Image: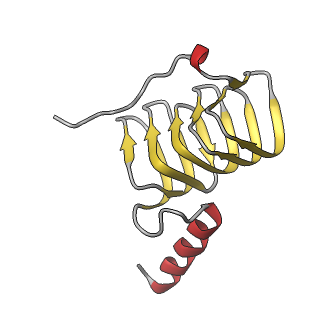
Amino acid sequence: MADLRLKLIDEADIDTVFADDVEFEGELAFQDPVLVKGQIKGRLQSAADVYISEQARVDAELAAEVVSVKGELRGDVYARRKLELFSSGRVDGTVRTPDLIVQSGAVLNGTCRMDGDPAAGPAETAASTASAASRGD
């Protein structure tokens, strides 16, 4: 049996929540976990975890320890520890993570790299993926 380690979160445990009526465009940086229920466009960096709820839409370059997706995420994603993609989740873009968990029904379109420098961020991820594609890797 597969080791399914998807973690359910309690909103009460998260200090920063972007409610479903919030639309934000720009650059955000956090030290603590973040729950996105609304829409974010731009760049999101967290020293902790980022949770994207079912109704959320994120069009961003995203870097965090754990990225947990139940909604829609488009862009370059760097999950330093793990990317969790729930059955309702959709990721379109370039992914870099050492640990990828995908529930049946989830959608992942793009490229995924599970090697390389763990300190590299999203910009390095996009550059290394483009380089690999030009070499035919």
Query: Is residue 71 left or right of 4 when viewed as pictured?
Result: right
Q: What residue appears at the point 75 percent right and 39 percent down from the top-left corner?
A: 40
Quadrant of the snapshot with the C terminus: bottom left
- The residue sitting at the bottom extreme is 135
Q: In terms of depth relative to the viewer, which is nearer, 15 or 113?
A: 15
Q: Is residue 75 above or below residue 134?
A: above
Residue extending furthest top? 12
The front one of 60 and 72 is 60
Q: Residue at x 72, y 28 (%)?
A: 38
Residue 96: x, y in percent? 49, 58
Q: Is residue 16 above or below residue 115?
A: above
- Determine which quarter of the picture holds residue 86: top left
Quarter in which the N terminus is drawn: top left
Q: Nearer the viewer, residue 122 or 135?
A: 122
Residue 14 in which image quadrant:
top right
Q: Which residue of the protein is positioned furthest toward the left in this rendering?
A: 1
Mark count? 0
Q: Picture coordinates of residue 127 (x, y %)?
A: 60, 74
State the residue at coordinates (40%, 55%).
98
**In this rendering, would 62 be left or right of 22?**
left
- Percent across and percent down for residue 29 are 74, 44
- Residue 20 percent across, percent down from the top left: 73, 22
The image's colouring method is secondary structure
Name the residue located 52 percent from the left edge and 31 percent from the top edge. Answer: 70
Q: Is residue 51 left or right of residue 112?
A: right
